[in-house]
Amino acid sequence: MTEKEKSAQGLLYNANYDSELMRERRFCKAMCYEYNNLHPDKIGEREELIKKLFGKTGKIFFIEQPFICDYGYNIEIGENFYVNHNCTILDSAKVIFGDNVFIGPNCGFYPPQHPIDRAERNIGLEYAYPITVGNNVWIGGSVVVLPGVTIGDNSVIGAGSVVVKNIPANVVAVGNPCRVMRKIEAVNPQYSII
C-alpha cells in the first residue's frame, strides 16, 4: 500500500519523505503561488486555476488571495462559496464544504494530526482525518478546524474559535474549545434563499 493510499484510509503514513506526496505538494505550492500572484482583477484566470487545483467546485465561488493548500485535489466546494484572505487548508484528507459557505479571514482547516509518540512523529509519520462543513455555514475570522470535525448545516462558528469536535446543525458555537452557545431558532423568510 502506498503512503497516499494509507493517508486516504486514515492510517499512519509518511508525509515528509514519500516522493509521490512530496511531488504533489510541490505542484500544489506552485499552483498556489501562481494564484496568489495573479492581479486581483483577473477573476476568470483565478477561477480556472482553482478549478484545476480542487477536486470539485461549484459554478459560483470566490477565494480571496492569498490562499494556501497542500494538495488541492482533496478539497471540494459547493455553490456560492466565499473565502476571505489568508485561508490555509492542509488537505491531507478530504475537506468538503457545502453550498452557501462563508469563511472569514485567517482561517485554517487542518486534517493532518501528528502522533503523540515522538519516535513516530520525528520520522515524519502522521494521520489525516476528513473535515466536512455543511450547507449555509458561516465561519468567523481566525477560526481553526481540526482533524475529523463535521460542522452541521446552518451553523455559525464565532471568530477565534478552535473547533476540536463535531458541531451540530442550526447552532451558534464559539470558543477554545468551540462549544455550542445557542440554537438558531428561526430564519427570516424575507432574506432566505433556502
Image: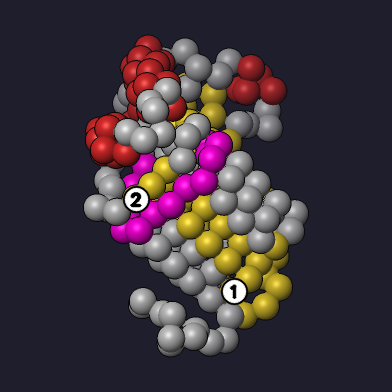
Q: Residue at x 63, y 50 (%)?
A: 141
177 is within the stretch colored magenta:
no
Is residue 98 in view? yes
Q: Which numbered disc covers residue 61? A: 2
Q: Residue furthest right?
A: 176
Q: Identify the image quadrant of residue 79.
A: bottom left
Q: Element at badge 1?
A: strand
Rendering coords of residue 112 (x, y %):
53, 36
The residue segment tinted magenta is 75-88
Q: Which numbered disc covers residue 171? A: 1
Category of crowding for the residue at label 2, using alpha-carbon neighbours closer than 10 angstroms: few (below 14), some (14–19), many (at least 20): some
Q: Earlier in the sequence, mark 2 or mark 1?
A: 2
Q: Which residue lies furthest to the front in this view?
A: 41
- Left or right of 107 in this view: 26: left
Above or below for 98 versus 83 = below
The N terminus, quarter of image? top left
Rendering coords of residue 91 (x, y %):
44, 36
Q: Report the amino acid beneath label 2.
A: Phe
Q: Residue at x 53, y 87 (%)?
A: 186
- Left or right of 11 in this view: 56: left
